[in-house]
């Protein structure tokens, strides 16, 4: 066989690429040169004598004996005879651990220097620890229009064959990476048994020893990587396996001389159900199959391929009983799933999970409050601004549990939303805010079932409060009807008395004595009070129901303060709100809210201080704003704070020129705010009397 040009130099290049230092020395025979390679780093740095056999020697045992004698003479730790061409004889295998002198093929040396066997072994062991073969869902597809039942097996055959085309894996659903990983595992096991023949499937950006890239190994390995459609059309020196990302329904990848296009099909419902039933007991499998067909949201979650193992663990641990209602099965499985998910970090092979689901377990655990707040927002307002509080790099994995985080953030899986709603209710109740149970009409089938599983005590309260709330609602409705009728009659009576008062004035002297003047003034005060009481009673029970829009907060405040500034010019009123700020609400409700709060503040300051001041101060809270209405009046006594928002409770008793309070302004402000998703309350920690309104910003404002 003709000797190739400078084979020693090519082998030397391999050693250098692996970060080894090369030296030479004269041998014991004339014209003999010994070549050595030695690592430049590490605690153990064996000195290797190496030489090249252009072809396999005829007398193999004698050649190996000579190699060992040369090693001893050279004082090397080991000796390698690199077979440039051909294969090792039958029955002989390279043993780098136990033979100090051994023969090795050029291909095997390159793979060893690049740490490929070590990497393949590590990948196989991790996949085994992860129980990848047990949890792999076999996928179907098509190649050139022909059906393929096991795509992983097809990839194995292609990787070991002689087809020079790239294999391009496309598909609309998920699971392309899992198919490649399964194929790489099957090939990897064979490679560890026969590394001189089998071509391993390695990820393109796998970190090899030193500076040896995967592609420099030529046809000895099969690299794979995620690429865009445009990347696939480029010619490459080494054939490879490409997983095409973001492959739209109308996009195509050309085949021809460069590419072999393989299309992955979505797993059918029956594929998924069959897979689960094979890994569960017959009883659990039957329950799950029925629940899968019963609830489409559960079916969507059960199809999340990176989480199949978590779902099997959750279903097995859910303690389901034969004959259990579907709704109960669904609630039990979902609740258990999130418990399993938070423990996922302790699973064997968790690093492999992170390739596809990122830090999802930590996001669910560490950002639980944000997800709970977002669930309530999405339920009440069909939006979920609180998702923006989660770190951007942690939002991507949320798609696996049905949470959208990009253009229109929210929950597109009702089960997941209702699970986090239940957690939100528990958090609120445990913090003493029980009104959440009656403020919203939560879906009974899901939310209350989750409550019963997560916190039976809160669930019992919810059912009890629902019953009380229903009775209270009926009583409130009846009282409301009575009060509206009384308000109507009261207003009509006030009008009639005013008319009579005007007629009476025409018959009275123009100048009345002090006693008569005070009596007339007192009557007019009482009439004004009754008129306002009637008007505000009506407004308390007739909350505007206009559609929510984006409203300029500055315009609302200017309108609400205008009349008060005219009637009480002695009060200094400063409004600190940006002109461009907009909030969600309807203008009528917002004007009523701030009219009530500003009137309360003006009255409190005007009659109690020589320098009466009212201020409106904005506090930006991200997705919400807090508007503080402050005054320097005498404040609210501690014993009055608990009932200040109850109807007809007032601390303004009139007299000395002071207005008599109706006790309706603050209840109206709170009720109107709640009707548009806001909140009104007293901040007792401020030095000045401070009532605040919390509102949701207009879409996009945050």
Image (cartoon, rainbow, N blue to C red):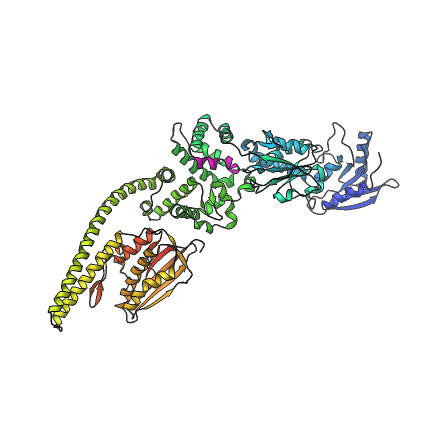
Report the magenta stretch's main SS: helix
Magenta residues, start to end: 294-308
In the image, is residue 180 part of the stretch drawn in magenta?
A: no
- Residue at 84% over, 37% down: 3
Give the side of residue 411 with respect to residue 160, left or right: left
- Please identify the quadrant where the C terminus is shown: bottom left
In the image, is residue 301 part of the stretch drawn in magenta?
A: yes
Residue extending farthest to the right is 30
Tell me where residue 7 appears, x and y as whole percent: 80, 40
Give the side of residue 151 with respect to residue 18, left or right: left
26 w.r.t. 576: above or below = above
263 w.r.t. 372: above or below = above
**In which image quadrant can residue 144 be found?**
top right
Taking the image as drawn, is residue 688 in sight? no
Taking the image as drawn, is residue 46 in sight? yes
Residue extending farthest to the bottom is 511
Tell me where residue 687 appears, x and y as whole percent: 33, 64
Tell me where residue 314 appears, x and y as whole percent: 46, 35
Residue extending farthest to the top is 282
- Please identify the quadrant where the N terminus is shown: top right
Tell me where residue 489 appears, x and y as whole percent: 18, 54
- Residue at 10% over, 69% down: 507
> Which sits in the foreground, 540 or 284?
540
- Residue at 50% over, 47% down: 395
312 w.r.t. 534: above or below = above
Give the side of residue 71 with respect to residue 44, left or right: right
């Amino acid at each position: 066989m003709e000797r190739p040009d400078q084979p020693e130099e090519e082998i030397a290049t391999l050693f250098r690429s692996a970060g080894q230092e090369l030296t030479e020395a004269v041998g014991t025979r004339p014209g003999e040169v010994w070549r050595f390679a030695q690592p430049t780093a590490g605690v153990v740095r064996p000195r290797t004598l190496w030489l090249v056999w252009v072809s396999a020697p005829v007398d193999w045992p004698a050649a190996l004996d000579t190699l060992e004698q040369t090693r001893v003479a050279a004082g090397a730790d080991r000796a390698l005879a690199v077979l440039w061409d051909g294969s090792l004889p039958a029955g002989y295998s390279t043993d780098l651990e136990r033979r100090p002198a051994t023969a090795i093929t050029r291909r095997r040396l390159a793979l060893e220097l690049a740490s490929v066997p070590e990497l393949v072994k590590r990948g196989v062991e991790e996949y085994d620890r992860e129980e990848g073969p047990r949890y792999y869902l076999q996928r179907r597809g098509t190649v050139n229009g022909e059906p393929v039942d096991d795509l992983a097996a097809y990839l194995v055959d292609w990787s070991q064959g002689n087809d020079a085309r790239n294999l391009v894996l496309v598909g609309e659903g998920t699971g392309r990476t899992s198919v490649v990983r399964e194929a790489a595992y099957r090939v990897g096991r064979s490679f560890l048994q026969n590394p001189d023949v089998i071509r391993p499937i390695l990820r393109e950006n796998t970190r090899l020893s030193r500076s040896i890239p995967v592609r420099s190994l030529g046809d000895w390995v099969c690299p794979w990587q995620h690429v865009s459609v445009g990347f696939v059309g480029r010619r490459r020196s080494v054939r490879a396996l490409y997983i095409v990302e973001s492959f739209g329904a109308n996009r195509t990848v050309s085949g021809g001389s460069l590419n072999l296009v393989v299309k992955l099909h979505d797993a059918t419902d029956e594929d998924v159900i069959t897979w689960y039933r094979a890994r569960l007991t017959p009883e659990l499998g039957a329950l799950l199959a029925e629940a899968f067909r019963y609830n489409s949201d559960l079916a969507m979650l059960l199809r999340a391929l990176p989480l199949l193992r978590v779902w099997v663990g959750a279903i097995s641990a859910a303690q389901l009983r034969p004959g259990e209602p579907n709704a109960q099965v669904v609630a039990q499985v979902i609740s258990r799933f999130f418990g399993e998910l938070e423990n996922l970090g302790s699973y064997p092979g968790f690093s492999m999970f992170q390739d596809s689901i990122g830090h999802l377990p930590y996001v669910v655990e560490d950002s639980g409050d944000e997800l709970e707040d977002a669930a309530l927002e999405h339920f009440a307002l069909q939006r979920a601004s609180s998702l923006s509080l989660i770190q951007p790099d942690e939002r991507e994995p949320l798609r696996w549990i049905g949470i959208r985080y990009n253009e229109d953030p929210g929950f597109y899986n009702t089960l997941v939303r209702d699970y986090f709603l239940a957690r939100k209710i528990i958090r609120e109740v445990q913090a003493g805010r029980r009104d959440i149970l009656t403020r919203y009409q939560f879906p009974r089938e899901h939310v209350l079932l989750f409550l019963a599983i997560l916190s039976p005590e809160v669930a019992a309260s919810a059912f009890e409060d629902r019953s009380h709330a229903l009775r209270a609602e009926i009583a409130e409705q009846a009282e409301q009807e009575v009060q509206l009728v009384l308000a109507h009659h009261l207003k009509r009576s006030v009008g009639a008395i005013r008319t009579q008062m005007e007629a009476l004035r025409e018959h009275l002297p123009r100048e009345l004595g002090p006693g008569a003047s005070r009596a007339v003034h007192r009557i007019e005060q009482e009439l004004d009070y009754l008129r306002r009481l009637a008007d505000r009673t009506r407004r308390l029970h007739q909350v505007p129901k206009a559609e929510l829009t984006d409203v300029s907060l500055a315009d609302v405040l200017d309108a609400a303060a205008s009349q008060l500034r005219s009637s009480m010019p002695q009060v200094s009123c400063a409004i600190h709100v940006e002109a461009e700020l907009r909030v969600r609400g309807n203008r009528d409700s917002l004007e009523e809210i701030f009219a009530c709060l500003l009137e309360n503040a003006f009255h409190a300051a005007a009659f109690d201080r020589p320098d009466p001041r009212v201020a409106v101060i904005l506090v930006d809270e991200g997705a919400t704003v807090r508007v503080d209405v402050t005054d320097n009046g005498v404040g609210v006594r501690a014993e009055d704070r608990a009932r200040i928002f109850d109807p007809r409770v007032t601390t303004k008793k009139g007299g000395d020129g002071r207005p008599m309070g109706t006790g309706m302004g603050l209840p109206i402000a709170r009720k109107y705010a709640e009707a548009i998703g806001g909140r009104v309350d007293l901040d007792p920690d401020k030095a000045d009397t401070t009532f605040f309104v919390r509102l949701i910003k207009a879409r996009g404002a945050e």
